[in-house]
Image (cartoon, rainbow, N blue to C red):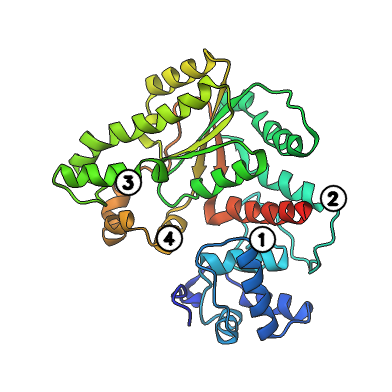
Amino acid sequence: MDMAEGHVGKQRAGWRPDRLHEQREAHGLTLEQAGERLREVAERAKLKGIPAANPQTLWQHEQGEVYPGPHYRRAYCLLYRATEPDLGFRSALPGEETSFKLTPMDDHLNGSHVLAVERAIHRIAPGSGEAGHHIDLQQRIIDAWKRRHTGGDPHSPCVVLVGGFAGSGKTEFSRFLTQLTGWPLVDKDPLTRPLVEQLLVALGSHAHDRHTEVYRERVRPAEYAALMQAVYANVQCRISTVVTAPFIAEMSDEQWMKRMINKCQAQGVDVAPIWVRCDVESMHEYISSRGAARDSWKLERWEEYLATINVDLQPVVPHLVVDNRMGTAISLADQARHAIRAVAV
């Protein structure tokens, strides 16, 4: 069994391992061939924690003995050009578009790459009644993607503010937007982590502290100030930017949001806040899979951590929402990335 695999499949509601077996056999693949292709597609997609995909592990998945971890599920979906409900990993969410059908294994180029992009982008939806005027962000992203091939952009610059709880998938989705549009990505963690860790140690805490008053009161404000200075540098140059961080306190603070929006609009730059919505089980799975030291406190005291957050939190200003419950948005983003790479070949 691979190190990433530790979930007992029989405890998963809605799981249909027979579908995974059916899909493989319908494509005429042996377990060895499926494993080889699974490794190839995971490597091409640059998935973290590329699965070993040995025949024994794949057989355990198909027999319902082991529930595939997130990296395996993403790789399976890419291999078979399908969604998680298509492959029987779970039941479809209410309103989730899904159909179980066999898909071609070749990469012949056709109009499907446009559909893949549009399908992924339409996971962005109004998160509040007043957010309707933000919905043109979908078209902005698609236009920016097309602009990279055809030239010309009818829109003013835009800052896309992507927030969400740890493990919600916000970084993955932000990277996807950047890959589509070519807009720069400003990600809090790689931008500030080296200084944050040294500052925490200098203040008598430990490098991976993200839960004590030392971090919350003395380090976090400076961390977010540095992040936003980087964003404002792009705003002053009228460069569209995707910026991602939890933004829990910030998106809950109407005054902070209004100041930020006004500062950008004064430079002729629009702001589109996006909240990435995720379920508790998926967040725990994502956090466990990435193995970041800064998450150790959350994982060791998961119930205590959950008591400190409101999973139903919504930004206080008009915003968009990406529904990533059960990884639905990231799965579609994977499909679109695969299509984009095929087009670029």
Image height of 127 relative to 37, above or below: above
| 277 relative to 105 in the view: left or right | left
Where is residue 335? Give x, y as percent: 68, 56
Q: CA distance from mark 2 to mark 1?
A: 19 Å
Image height of 276 relative to 144, above or below: below
Q: CA distance from mark 3 to mark 4?
A: 18 Å
Where is residue 242? Give x, y as percent: 54, 35
Residue with the mark numbered 1: 83
Q: CA distance from mark 4 to mark 2?
A: 34 Å
Residue 251 visible in image: no
Residue with the mark numbered 3: 194
Kindly state the secondary structure of the residue where label 2 is placed: loop
Q: CA distance from mark 1 to mark 4?
A: 22 Å
| 107 relative to 126 in the view: left or right | right
12 or 324, which is in the foreground? 324
| Mark 2 burial class by Cα count in 10 Å: few <14, some 14-19, many 20+ | few
62 or 138, which is in the foreground? 138
Residue with the mark numbered 4: 290
